[in-house]
């Protein structure tokens, strides 16, 4: 498919989406029938609108093959169900972004694959934590408290930070951390090799697996069975350790797992 054909298709799809989203009644009717078919009385009670208004909206949706009437109940067609599913996803994505808008707006998102940006709704329960002028280490301290309770950690680390390494090595030495998987760049690996204490604690430790990537990383992701955390870079290229996104829900962990896998699967292991 050529770029021109793709643009035409997108324009046509946009018209269909706009037709639904620009009408509160059409949108609410589709969402009302998402869980189960409804008769006119049920729709009237749920939407708090007169029958004439609801029937007009139903007729419009029926014309677009988004709903059909079976006996006395209105239900979504397959097209209508797919549309409703994606409408809900759009609403949840927007809700998730809006909840933590400062975090997303302030940072460079190029390190997050587009497919995962489309699934931001999975992070709707995540908590945004920021440092303050009275507590500059608030975000970092929250992070250290989190990793201190985990037996297993998988980390994409885009920076060489002896402060982070010191805490992680302490957990390894105290046997609080049983397994560490670390995704780092070639530059960071080279720096670790030049530091004898880090070299011994990380590269020669059987509890540590190093995965080396060729390019510079733009996300700091920590993932464990209990939590995920994400810190990013400012748009000017500087790493920001003052703001962190923390999630503990099943959906947050799923999102983090997929993000981690995209980096792990396309790179090779090297020590």
Image: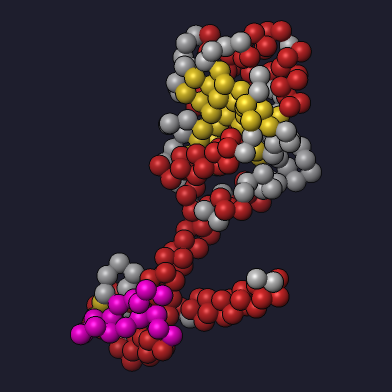
26, above or below 98, in the image? below
Residue 43 position within the rendered picture, expressed as x and y whole percent measured from the top left: 29, 79
249, above or below 214, in the image? below
Q: Which span is picked out in magenta?
A: 64-79
Front-most of residues 151 and 8: 8
Front-most of residues 249 and 242: 249
63, above or below 82, in the image? below
Q: Residue at x 61, y 23 (%)?
A: 210
In the rendered picture of this protein, how many numbered marks are placed on residues? 0
Q: Residue at x 58, y 35 (%)?
A: 264
User: Is residue 38 covered in magenta?
Assistant: no
Residue 142 appears in the picture as rendered: no
10, above or below 267, in the image? below
Residue 87 appears in the picture as rendered: yes
Q: Residue at x 75, y 19 (%)?
A: 191
Q: Quadrant of residue 142?
A: top right
Q: Which residue, as the protein is rendered here, is positioned at the far right? A: 236
Front-most of residues 66 and 34: 66
Residue 229 position within the rendered picture, expressed as x and y whole percent measured from the top left: 54, 35
Q: Quadrant of residue 82?
A: bottom left
The image quadrant where one finds the C terminus is top right
Q: Residue at x 73, y 14 (%)?
A: 193
Q: Quadrant of residue 46?
A: bottom left
The image quadrant where one finds the N terminus is bottom right
Residue 177 position within the rendered picture, expressed as x and y whole percent measured from the top left: 48, 17
Residue 49 position within the rendered picture, expressed as x and y whole percent measured from the top left: 34, 83
Front-most of residues 257 and 143: 257
């Amino acid at each position: 498919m050529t770029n021109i054909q793709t643009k035409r298709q997108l324009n046509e799809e946009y018209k269909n989406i706009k037709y639904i989203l620009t009408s509160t009644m059409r949108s609410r009717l589709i969402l009302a029938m998402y869980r189960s078919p409804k008769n006119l009385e049920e729709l009237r009670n749920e939407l708090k609108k007169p029958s004439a208004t609801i029937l007009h909206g139903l007729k419009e949706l029926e014309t677009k093959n988004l709903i059909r009437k079976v006996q006395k109940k209105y239900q979504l067609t397959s097209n209508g169900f797919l549309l409703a599913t994606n409408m809900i996803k759009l609403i949840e994505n927007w809700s998730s972004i809006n909840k933590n808008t400062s975090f997303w707006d302030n940072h460079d998102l190029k390190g997050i694959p587009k497919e995962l940006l489309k699934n931001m709704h999975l992070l709707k329960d995540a908590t945004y934590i920021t440092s303050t002028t009275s507590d500059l280490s608030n975000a970092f301290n929250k992070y250290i408290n989190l990793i201190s309770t985990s037996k297993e950690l998988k980390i994409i680390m885009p920076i060489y930070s002896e402060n982070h390494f010191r805490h992680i090595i302490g957990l390894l030495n105290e046997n609080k951390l049983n397994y560490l998987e670390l995704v780092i760049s070639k530059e960071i690996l080279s720096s670790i090799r030049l530091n004898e204490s880090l070299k011994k604690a990380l590269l020669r430790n059987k509890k540590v697996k190093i995965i080396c990537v060729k390019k510079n990383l733009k996300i700091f992701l920590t993932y464990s069975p209990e939590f995920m955390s994400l810190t990013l870079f400012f748009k000017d290229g500087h790493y920001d350790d003052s703001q962190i996104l923390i999630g503990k829900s099943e959906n947050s962990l799923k999102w983090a797992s997929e993000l981690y896998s995209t980096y792990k699967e396309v790179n090779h292991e090297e020590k």
